[in-house]
Image: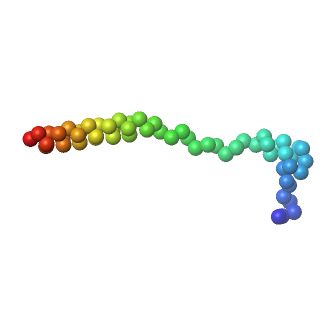
């Protein structure tokens, strides 16, 4: 390790400064999956209707 490295647990002041630094920002919330689920449901309904229409036709 380089000589200028200060272990935050080495003294109370350094540890408190280390402990109070903000953490890296979390990634933004993921977009809602509701439109994807609705779209998949619509596709399934259309495919079932198409299969039923072909089977009865």
Q: How is the image coloured?
A: rainbow
In the image, 46: left or right of 28? left
The outermost residue toward the left is 57
Residue depicted at 86% across the width and 55% down the height = 6
Residue depicted at 41% across the width and 35% down the height = 34
Picture coordinates of residue 25 (x, y %)? 64, 43
- Quadrant position of the N terminus in the picture: bottom right
In the image, 34: left or right of 11? left
Q: How many marks?
A: 0
Q: Quadrant of residue 17?
A: top right
In the image, 35: left or right of 42? right
Nearest the viewer among 44 and 25 is 44
Q: Quadrant of residue 44?
A: top left
- Quadrant position of the C terminus in the picture: top left
Picture coordinates of residue 12 (x, y %)? 89, 44
Does 7 appear above or below 25?
A: below
Nearest the viewer among 26 and 4 is 26
Nearest the viewer among 37 and 24 is 37
Q: Quadrant of residue 26?
A: top right
Picture coordinates of residue 45 (x, y %)? 26, 37
In the image, 23: left or right of 32? right
Residue depicted at 20% across the width and 38% down the height = 49
Picture coordinates of residue 3 (x, y %)? 87, 63
Residue depicted at 28% across the width and 41% down the height = 43
Does 1 appear above or below 56?
A: below
The outermost residue toward the right is 11
């Amino acid at each position: 390790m380089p000589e200028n490295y200060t272990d935050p647990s080495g003294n109370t002041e350094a540890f408190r400064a280390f402990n109070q630094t903000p953490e890296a920002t979390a990634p933004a919330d993921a977009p809602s999956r509701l439109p994807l689920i609705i779209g998949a449901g619509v596709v399934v309904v259309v495919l079932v209707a198409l299969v039923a229409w072909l089977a009865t036709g």
